[in-house]
Image (cartoon, helix red, strand yellow):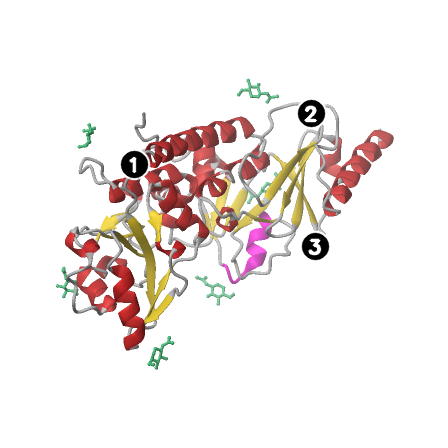
């Protein structure tokens, strides 16, 4: 008995040592039973399968997560918590999460809500999570008292969380660290591993990816490529986005990014030279996305945009004459939590479909995440009444008609 345990443990360790040495191994044990996930697109995590355990190597927090099957001998005897290795017994009996800017939708798609027991804020975009909280299923945890998180098998955090991330039960879930929309969406497999629901994770990713690719392929056949500027206004300065996943969205939607032709990205509206240049560049733009952060998305309208833009002679601005200025804050909670940071991360096909309608308007598709400022479209607030399923039931991905 002890020998067997030692053998498993040492094979787990040799696997980890190999991983920590940066060597790719194809899984440390030979006989792998159950369902497995293979990574196709994501860059920042890897999964290795053993017989009674799995290892996730997360390259964004630099940690290896050793996940031990609850029905194995190793489960009762093994506990690691070092700066580089943490162990968990799976499937997770229960977990909590730090919900600010956190894509809860991944958990909803996998059907993991029954094991979610604690959250850190009521400021959440997901209507069904709000409903779950309202039904008394969730404990409200105080972020200033991290010891409250220790009562759960795992506590999920996002990369940018400013809490100390060394606690033994913390798991960093960081799809937003990836560079492309599909790479972000593939993190559903990372979660699937913790719950032994690889099959479901694979199915969802396949459905999302094939829908996304179908849309992208149909956009690729468009001959004319509208020029898109995705920009933000902050402290008197307009900045064109450098975020890789946004630029990729524009390309995949059949548009052309501005940044390929210019190298200056910031423009101070009080500087005449800057404004001359910005004016000239914007004269080439067909579609403008205003990603300006604002404490009041409901009050952010065309008047405010034009005021920030500060360009008097608007005669050459095609995005104004064609009424194509958009913001990605259409879906948000009454507490101003944007679904852009939640649902849009796990279902990039919905964002792509929006962008295609923005670039090639048909007039018969209603966008999910983007609202047209110039047409006076307002943000829609989400409440628990917008939850359209039983809170414990898994969410199904929304597939866009595509031929
Ligand atoms: C793997 O997934 C398939 C399809 O969902 C299922 O039929 C099978 O029982 C699963 N195997 C294990 C060992 O979980
Ligand atoms: C979470 O699960 C663990 C393991 O089963 C258990 O010991 C713990 O009491 C549970 N915590 C809560 C808050 O239910
Ligand atoms: C959260 O914890 C802090 C520090 O213990 C405390 O000052 C604060 O009142 C708590 N907040 C709530 C809402 O309970
Ligand atoms: C913008 O330009 C003005 C005038 O030159 C300057 O005072 C201000 O600091 C600049 N703003 C930023 C954010 O650089
Ligand atoms: C935009 O909001 C401001 C302040 O609420 C309001 O005065 C203005 O009329 C609005 N503009 C449009 C175009 O609705
Ligand atoms: C939407 O509009 C396009 C272009 O006008 C048209 O080809 C397509 O059939 C329409 N689709 C639906 C579902 O009405």
What range of the chain is rendered magenta?
143-151
State the residue position of label 2: 32
Q: Residue at x 51, y 29 (%)?
A: 202
Inspect this view and state whether residue 366 appears: yes
Judge whether residue 128 is colored magenta.
Answer: no
Give above or below for 150 relative to 210: below
Q: Would you identify the image quadrant in which residue 343 lies?
A: top left
Single out the mark in the foreground, 1 or 3.
1
Helix, strand or loop at disc 3?
loop
Q: CA distance from mark 1 to mark 2?
A: 46 Å
58 displayed left or right of 350:
right
Judge whether residue 149 is colored magenta.
Answer: yes
State the residue position of label 3: 83
Helix, strand or loop at disc 1?
loop
* Ligand 2 under 8 Å from disc 3 Cβ: no
State the residue position of label 1: 222
- The number of numbered discs placed on residues in the rendered structure image is 3
Inspect this view and state whether residue 133 appears: no
Q: Would you identify the image quadrant in which residue 198 lies?
A: top right
| Rendered-image quarter of ligand 5 | bottom left
Chain-order first, disc 2 or disc 3: 2
Which of 47 and 108 lies nearest the eye of the viewer?
47
Q: Position of residue 317 (x, y in %)?
A: 20, 58
């Amino acid at each position: 008995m002890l020998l067997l345990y030692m053998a498993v443990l040492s094979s787990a360790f040799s696997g980890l040592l190999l991983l920590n040495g940066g060597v790719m191994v194809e899984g440390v044990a030979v006989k792998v039973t159950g369902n497995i996930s293979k990574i196709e697109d994501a860059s920042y995590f890897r999964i290795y399968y053993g017989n009674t355990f799995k290892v996730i190597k997360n390259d964004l927090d630099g940690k290896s997560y050793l996940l031990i099957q609850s029905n194995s001998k190793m489960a009762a005897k093994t506990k690691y918590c070092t700066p580089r290795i943490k162990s968990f017994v799976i499937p997770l009996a229960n977990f909590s999460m730090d919900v600010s800017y956190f894509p809860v939708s991944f958990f909803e798609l996998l059907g993991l809500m029954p094991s979610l027991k604690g959250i850190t804020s009521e400021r959440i975009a997901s209507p069904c999570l709000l409903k779950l909280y309202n039904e008394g299923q969730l404990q409200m945890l105080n972020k200033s008292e991290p010891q409250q998180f220790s009562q759960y098998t795992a506590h999920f955090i996002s990369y940018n969380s400013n809490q100390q991330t060394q606690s033994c039960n913390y798991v960093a879930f960081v799809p937003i660290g990836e560079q492309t929309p599909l790479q972000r969406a593939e993190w559903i497999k990372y979660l699937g591993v913790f719950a032994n629901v690889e099959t479901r994770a694979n199915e969802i990713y396949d459905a999302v990816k094939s829908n996304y690719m179908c849309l992208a392929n149909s956009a690729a056949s468009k001959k004319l490529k509208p020029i898109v500027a995705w920009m933000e206004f902050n402290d008197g300065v307009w900045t064109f986005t450098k975020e890789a996943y946004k630029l990729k969205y524009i390309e995949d939607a059949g548009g052309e990014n501005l940044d390929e032709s210019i190298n200056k990205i910031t423009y101070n509206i009080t500087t005449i030279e800057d404004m001359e240049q910005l004016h000239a560049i914007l004269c080439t733009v067909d579609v403008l996305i205003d990603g300006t952060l604002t404490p009041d998305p409901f009050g952010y309208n065309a008047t405010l945009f034009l005021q920030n833009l500060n360009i008097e002679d608007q005669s050459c601005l095609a995005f104004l004459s064609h009424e194509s200025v958009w913001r990605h804050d259409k879906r948000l909670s009454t507490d101003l939590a944007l679904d852009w940071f939640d649902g849009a991360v796990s279902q990039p096909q919905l964002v792509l479909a929006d962008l295609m309608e923005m670039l090639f308007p048909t007039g018969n598709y209603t966008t999910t995440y983007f609202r047209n400022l110039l047409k006076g479209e307002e943000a829609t607030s989400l409440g628990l009444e917008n939850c359209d399923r039983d809170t414990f039931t898994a969410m199904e991905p929304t597939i866009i008609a595509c031929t």
